[in-house]
């Protein structure tokens, strides 16, 4: 039998992935008994997982009503993008100052894999095979790994959180963003050991994606909430007893 802490971790990981994959979309009420049955475990680790998801910003808890997957406003999504630009620009600069050839070689493998998945993305969307996790995980591994290799462990943890939050905001906009700077080109800039060049490469990489989706979000939702399918996520609010 799994220990409670292990069950809690398992519930957290599985629910987090369900949010990323859109199985639990923004606005979806989280009914503890229903999720417990789905995960084949008791409600206790599910309750603990929901608290952790709230701490990470993925879930909102409304006293007396229950918990649901967070619905983001366009303004909040813009703030997430600004935070990423600041943090990851710093990471690229530090990486240019500190990474050696062995570290760059290891990251190059991930960069190539992510860039290849980027190239395949348009085909996946066209044939209805797109799934967030197929591109999200290697991309996260690259950006988080870069921060770790540069010795910025606290920033690496925050990048992980920000990337997960952004991934829940991609809603209905599954068009291919232009790639002005690839992951491999970011590494090439870092390999010059020029901090200014590396930071510019990273910021351009992130900004080109932001410039692609933010105008669409603003046109459709203004600065208000981004409503994906049904705001209620289907069904009535969960109650504390659910």
Image (cartoon, helix red, strand yellow):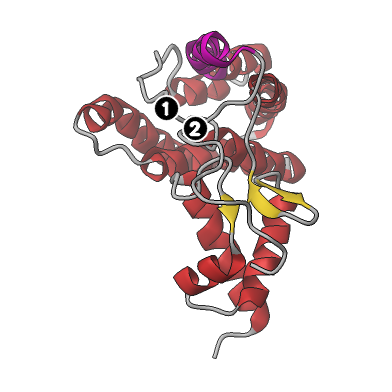
Magenta span: chief secondary structure: helix
Q: Which residue is mark 2?
A: 228
| 238 and 187: which is toward the camera | 238
Above or below residue 23? Residue 89 is above
| 9 and 28: which is toward the camera | 28
The answer, for residue 146, to whether it is visible in the render is no
Asked whether disc 2 touches disc 1, contact meaning CB atoms under 8 Å apart, the reply is yes
Residue 173 in which image quadrant? top left
Q: Which residue is mark 1?
A: 172
Please give the name of the residue rendered at 45% of the width and 26% of the height, measured from the top-left corner: 183
> Judging from the image, what secondary structure is the residue with disc 2 in?
loop
* Mark earlier in primary sequence (2, 1): 1
Residue 73 in which image quadrant? top right
Say which quadrant the N terminus sits in.
bottom right
| 81 and 107: which is toward the camera | 81
Can you give x and y, in whole percent of width and height, for residue 165 in the image? 61, 38
Q: Which residues are magenta?
A: 204-222
Say which quadrant the C terminus sits in.
bottom right
């Amino acid at each position: 039998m799994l220990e409670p802490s292990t069950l809690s971790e398992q519930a957290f990981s599985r629910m987090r992935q369900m949010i990323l994959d859109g199985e639990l979309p923004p606005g979806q009420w989280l009914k503890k008994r229903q999720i417990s049955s789905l995960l084949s475990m008791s409600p206790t680790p599910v309750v603990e997982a929901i608290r952790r998801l709230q701490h990470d910003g993925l879930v909102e808890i409304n006293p007396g009503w229950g918990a649901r997957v967070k619905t983001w406003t366009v303004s909040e999504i813009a703030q997430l993008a600004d935070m990423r630009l600041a943090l990851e620009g710093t990471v690229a600069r530090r990486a240019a100052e500190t990474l050696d050839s062995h570290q760059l070689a290891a990251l190059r493998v991930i960069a190539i894999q992510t860039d290849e998945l980027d190239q395949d993305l348009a085909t996946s969307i066209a044939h209805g095979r797109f799934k967030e996790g197929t591109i999200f995980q290697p991309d996260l591994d690259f950006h988080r790994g870069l921060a770790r290799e540069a010795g910025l462990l606290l920033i690496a943890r925050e990048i992980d959180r920000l990337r997960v939050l952004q991934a829940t905001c991609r809603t209905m906009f599954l068009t291919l963003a232009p790639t002005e700077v690839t992951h491999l080109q970011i590494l090439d800039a870092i390999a010059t050991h020029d901090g200014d060049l590396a930071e510019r490469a990273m910021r351009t990489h992130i900004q080109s994606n932001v410039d692609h989706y933010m105008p669409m979000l603003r046109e459709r939702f203004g600065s208000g909430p981004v409503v994906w399918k049904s705001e209620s996520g289907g069904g009535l609010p969960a109650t504390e007893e659910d």
